[in-house]
Amino acid sequence: MTLKSLTREISELSDYQVYGRVSGVLGMLVELSGLDRLLVIGSRCILIARDERRVPCEVIGFRQGHALLLPFGSLDGIGLGCKALLASSEPAIHPSDAWLGRVVNALGEPIDGKGPLPMGPDPYKVRSSPPPAHGRQRVGGKIDLGVRAINTFLSCCRGQRMGIFAGSGVGKSVLLSMLARYTSLDVNVIGLIGERGREVQEWLEDDLGPEGLARSIVVVATSDEPPLMRRQAAYMTMALSEYFRDNGRDVLCLMDSVTRFAMSMREIGLSAGEPPASKGYTPSVFAELPQLLERAGPGVKQQGSITGLFTVLVEGDDHNEPIADAVRGILDGHIILDRAIAERNRFPAINLLRSVSRTMPGCNVDSENELVTRGRQLLSTYENMAELIRIGAYNEGSDPVIDEAIAHNGALEAFLTQGKYEESTLAEGYEQLAAAIGMSWEQEAPELTEFQNQTQNET
């Protein structure tokens, strides 16, 4: 800890303590009396249990002169009359570059057994506002994500925000690990929200691996943790991303998943007495989603960017359910993982015909757009006739366009199939796509945008 950090912490210490008492407990909801005039929504309190254990809580509402709190931990030992201390400062973290390679919980505390985290000099609010729209840079040039289906057909640019929509067991986690390992960006900040506790260590060691972890910070809140912890994990992921962005880094923010964040918000809203709306989600859920997702994107001048890839766990493979529909309207593109494609063992199971990147075709040069357009035409033609082809009802020679789609389908399927330990660069992706669809290919030097020219000159 630096002298500046220590001095700041000492200056924040209060001369006295203010406390109230627990006046009611129902489920996970705690009613507090005595502090209602000092508290606001989002204030923090610390409950003192019978065994002197401290339980941090957050104010989520007020009712009949009492403050309503939800805990960040277990309420074991909390009963009527327990003391509640008013926390003196707004929740903030002090990140530094030394946090890279570490795994933390939703409160920014290390959980990887590697010792304490060095504190940086500047505090970062866990909940902050997105940068002003008029001050933000434009989206930058294309980035290499190492997955050829995305690099070619769904090109992602620096500062873009995309969603990965899929049901359970279709390959979201493996795809995220590939993106984290092979991206060309500087830093990964990965939020695992509501994950199965059993799978976290497996994902870190087997899927992400030491190479991916070395340039990443991983925030973990498992499915058994209270809703405040799961919600806080999403905020913590964005706060850490903002630290690196403010220091001029280009960040890849991976969050799995926004749906579990929304579910935690639903639990909080229902506990506070909000009326349920679409599929039980409360109105505050849909108000909070843009507040979270808009924090990703390009920074202001002299800052880096946050490229966001957010997974959405669609219920019952319904891609029009409320959360999927709301998130799709906020983000700059969506990648659909299809269970039918996964069942025929093609991974990543991306349905390219239903997926879109909103920075295309403007981010590509003409020759790249020609390749992508031709590839989509062949995929679409084959998909339209797939049932007839499979049952043998299509006669070869009936339509030369369909014959061509059939001839190239095997090569296209092989192109779109990629193992999780197989890396593919942008240039290799276009070369392989050209070979798969039988087109000649010569790499063009892309024209730099004004933003890219400025960034290059500054570098």
Image (spheres, rainbow, N blue to C red):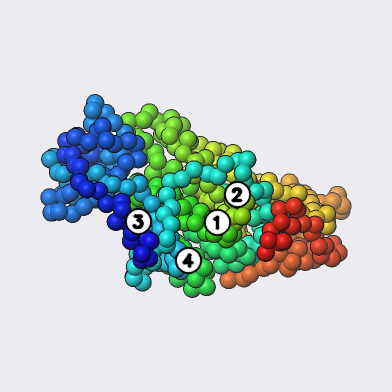
Q: Secondary structure at mark 3?
A: helix
Q: Residues within 10 Å of mark 1 (few under 14, many from 20)?
A: many
Q: Is residue 8 left or right of residue 145?
A: left
Mark 3 or mark 4, earlier in chain: 3
Q: Residues within 10 Å of mark 4 (few under 14, many from 20)?
A: some
In the image, residue 8 lies at what x, y percent?
35, 56
User: Image quarter for residue 83?
Assistant: top left
In the image, residue 64 lies at what x, y percent?
24, 26
Give the mark toward the camera: 1 or 2.
2
Mark 1 or mark 3, earlier in chain: 3
Mark 4 or mark 2, earlier in chain: 4
Question: Disc 1 to disc 2, how far (Cα)?
Answer: 10 Å
Q: Is residue 404 left or right of residue 192?
A: right
> Which residue has dot 2 on it?
300
Q: Secondary structure at mark 4?
A: helix
Give the mark toward the camera: 3 or 4.
3
> Which residue has dot 4 on it?
97
Q: Secondary structure at mark 2?
A: loop
> Which residue has dot 3 on it?
8
Question: Disc 1 to disc 3, how far (Cα)?
Answer: 24 Å
Question: Disc 2 to disc 3, how far (Cα)?
Answer: 27 Å
Residue at image coords 44%, 32% = 283
> Which residue has dot 1 on it?
245
Question: Disc 3 to disc 4, how far (Cα)?
Answer: 20 Å
Amino acid at circle 3: Arg
